[in-house]
Image (spheres, rainbow, N blue to C red):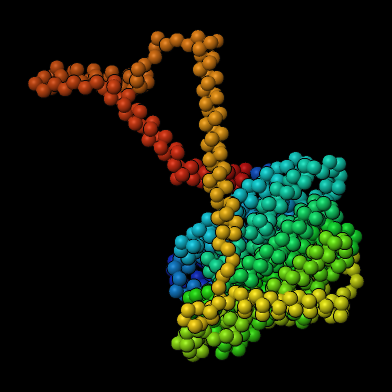
Amino acid sequence: MNRNILLAILVFYPFLGGILVYLAGKYREICRDYLADFITVSEFLAAAALMTVDGAELQVPGICGFGLGFALDGFRGIYGCIASLMWMMVTVFSREYFRNHENKNRFYLFLLWTLGATMGIFYSADLYTTFIFFEIMSFTSYVWVVQEETEDAIRAAQTYLAVAVTGGMVMLMGLFLLYHELGTLVIAEMLPASAACADKSLLYVAGTCLLVGFGAKAGAFPLHIWLPKAHPAAPAPASALLSGILTKTGIFGILIISCQLFFGDGVWGKLILAIGVVTMFMGALLALFSVDIKRTLACSSMSQVGFILVGIGMQGLLETEQALAVHGTFLHMVNHSLIKLVLFMAAGVIYMNTHALNLNEIRGFGRNKPLFKGIFLTGALAIAGIPFFSGYISKTLLHESIVEFGGGMPGKMIEILFLISGGLTVAYMTKLYVAVFVEENTDSEKQKSFDETEKFMNRESGFALAASAVILLIWGLFPHSLMDRAATYAQSFMNLQETGERVSYFAPENLLGMVISVGIGAAVYVLIVRKVLMRKMENGTVQYVDLWPKWLDLENLIYRPVVLGILPSAGRILSRILDTILDGIVVLLRKTIYHDSPLPHEREEGNILTEILGKILNAVQTVKNHTVRRKHPVYRDYVHEMAVRNEEFKENNRVIERSLSFGLMLFCIGLTLTLIYLIWW
């Protein structure tokens, strides 16, 4: 089959598959489940077949003048393969997870549609195509978050959609500015076009707008507010994809801006580095305080995104010595995707059996489950950066890029925060592992039921979880033959041509950083987790407690009050002031220049239509009073009655126009017309 045709199938096949799966589910659930498995498995096989193909291109012309463009290179090929692999595992796992859930057809429909949108993003050849599929992905993945339809899920979904839509609109503004300045949105043409641009002030504005849009999806600070709320609310299979892949679509966009638009730009590199350091540290701190296993993993995702952003920032600062940062960035992206696939599915197994996520309630669940314990431990050691696991390799490369940069005291502070964040990762992953797999539950009866549970997941779920852990383990055991080769294959996307020197990962100087982070993690776990974040209750039991101040929730502290309170109020006050000024000017003109006087044809009430209709009805009434109603005449002023009904009609319209539902209806109509235009013209 032609590779360009296969590229189109990879993008559009899941959209058709979603419809088929939905219809199959209406007929029989088992048919839907096996069909969904077949679609995701075939998608993975096709993506794997294209992974080593470089240079494939596809254009779909006629969409809004730009058309859709797709391309394939090492980076895109690998990430397309990873995305389809994760979807395949999650789809197999979802069968048991959703066994007793409602709205399963809806979930599978949007699961596959989001796969198509995600593949469209990773294979996009221009930012216009990226934007189209980015917005599709935001709306389809919204259904994941709201799937359970609980109060928390609905609120989390509102936050997720608000951040996604706002980020998308700001991104669109950036695309307009970028196209105006460069005359192209094709990713491969942006580097030379940017280099030829003499005045880059407008490019920085456009780049910042794009950064807001992509950063919102990546979960970068301060646009991370959706991440700790959406993951606990969403089903575990959706959380694995939200964390492992959808955040990487945001990173993909940030890489395009940083490596194509601002390649080697120190100013831009410092901006990304600053955002990355704050995101890395704050995410780790939030994860440490959390007592909800999925919230902890969600905050961990925020922190790991920060590690990746640090690598992207270092690429802009290291100029010609970028190999360490480029390879570290890419490998940590891949590692985080595979790690969170394992950890979130493991959290899903825990939830399936306990229907709880709080550490105090799930405590001791995995004590007598050696295989499950080993699977979770593989993910925990990998994300903690322990030697012989994949996270150690990527974190070592990122750490060495910081050391390579130097940067005096600021560079030293960045290195310290990097090592501390790594230590916090060790601490909160130790907290999760000890709580679930080492400690006993404070309720002896509950612990007994945990220990006696033998069949806690079926064979399909076991396969998805164990196979994902084995892939992660093998990936980390061969850093040079697997990880380095993959990074070298993907590096051209980030404009790196030379591979750099072969890194001796287990040299003493590289192991030192890991030892420092583990030491910090051990100290934090013993002194903070065990002494501060665990309290003895009145009944004598020791419980995990969440001491993070509730008022420090940025959504409730800043975003909702500003967006829903201050901005609308300020807008109303400003509008009232402008309206009063305009009314004053009109009155002044009518009293002076125009010498206002009553018009001879002005009506006391109603308009010409109500007057004509009223006179006609009055005439009909007169005729009836002289004929059929001679004994019981009726006298009504229909001119006045029509005028009154007209005022009532206008008032009802004004009420409707002021309502939120009417505004949403107009928005939906406008959005529908826009999408029709984009598709057909």
629 relative to 100, above or below: above
Residue found at x 55% / y 51%: 560
Q: Quadrant of the N terminus?
A: bottom right
> Looking at the image, is 280 positioned above or below residue 518?
above
Question: In what quadrant of the picture does the C terminus appear?
Answer: top right
Q: Is residue 103 visible?
A: yes
Q: Residue at x 50, y 70 (%)?
A: 32
> Where's residue 236, x and y in %?
55, 71
Q: Residue at x 53, y 55 (%)?
A: 158
In front of the other: 156 or 430: 430
* Residue 31 place in picture, x, y as percent: 49, 72
Please give the name of the residue rendered at 56% of the width and 70% of the height, measured from the top-left corner. 546
Of 476 and 300, nearer the camera is 300
Nearer to the camera, 410 or 214: 410
Residue 401 is drawn in which quadrant? bottom right
For this view, does 258 lie left or right of residue 619? right
Task: Tell which of 485 and 573 is nearer to you.
Answer: 573
Res 336 → quadrant: bottom right
Instruction: Determine the image quadrant of residue 395.
Output: bottom right
Q: Residue 597 placed where, x, y %?
A: 45, 10
- In the rendered image, the vertical position of residue 379 relative to residue 108, given as above or below: below
In the picture as drawn, the residue positioned furthest to the left comes out as: 631
Q: Is residue 77 visible?
A: no
Question: Is 526 situated left or right of 109 in this image?
Answer: right
